[in-house]
Amino acid sequence: MSVLFDRLKRVFDDGHGSPHPDLITDERFAEGTPRPAAVLIPVTDRARPGVILTQRPQDLRSHPGQVAFPGGKIDAGETPVEAALREAEEEIALPRGDVRIIGATDNYLTGTGFDITPVLGIVTPDLPLVPNPGEVESWFEVPLATLFDRSNYDRNSVYWRGAERSYYEMHYEGYRIWGVTAAIIANLSRRLELTELFD
């Protein structure tokens, strides 16, 4: 059994034991019926765990160049976990057999009409991941401690759809982590107390 899996599972379950009053959402900007989607938050099983993120190609019509978790729309008949695993396999050749699921955290409703279920999982480290060029330009790994340290983020705002919208933003080795991805990270970090993971 993985020590990291056991610790993170315990912290995850404790952190999701009751409602949280201070989670971020873009619900007020959403229009129409949201489409269900899922993303995988892949945490590498190593002494200093990291989180795998992807960058979308610059020539995509939707969200070009943005940093994201592997994921996408949930197909008919799929669960969020199944969709997250399928998308990770399609996008970066992450074998679903190398992922141990911790659980699904709080859904995030985006202003662009998606209801995203983030799925947290532990993955085998140093896998030979290969980006699908039609969906992913590159992938990278950020230390979990860095990603979940709120002092590494700036809080900015923009006027969007007739209202002020605030968002978190962090720069890491040339990558800009912001928007929905940063919000999902912020919400999960509020659920978890990570100190014991780094003892």
Image (cartoon, grey):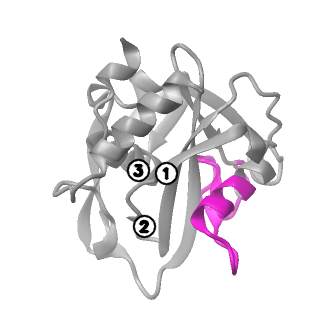
Residue receiving disc 1: 103
Nearer the observer, disc 3 or disc 1?
A: 1
Q: Is 105 placed above or below 162 here?
A: above
20 vs 56, nearest the viewer: 20
Nearer the observer, disc 2 or disc 1?
A: 1
User: Which comes before the other along the chain, label 3 or label 2?
Assistant: 2
Q: Is residue 82 visible?
A: yes
87 vs 64, nearest the viewer: 87
* Measured Cα–Cα span from mark 3 to mark 2: 11 Å
User: Which comes before the other along the chain, label 3 or label 1?
Assistant: 1
- The type of residue carrying mark 3 is Ile
Which residue is situated farthest in the left direction here?
A: 21
Side of 54 where 104 appears, left or right:
left
Residue receiving disc 2: 110
Q: Is 75 placed above or below 187 here?
A: below
User: Which comes before the other along the chain, label 2 or label 1?
Assistant: 1
Judged by its main secondary structure, the magenta piece is loop
What is the secondary structure assignment of the residue under circle 1? strand
Side of 99 where 193 appears, left or right:
left
Q: Are marks 2 and 1 in contact (CB under 8 Å)?
A: no
**Residue at (18, 54) in percent of width and height:** 22
Q: Are marks 3 and 1 in contact (CB under 8 Å)?
A: no
**Residue at (68, 64) in percent of width and height:** 61
Which quarter of the rendered picture does the C terminus lie within? top left
Span highlighted in magenta in the image: 57-86
* Measured Cα–Cα span from mark 2 to mark 1: 21 Å
Identify the disc placed on residue 184.
3
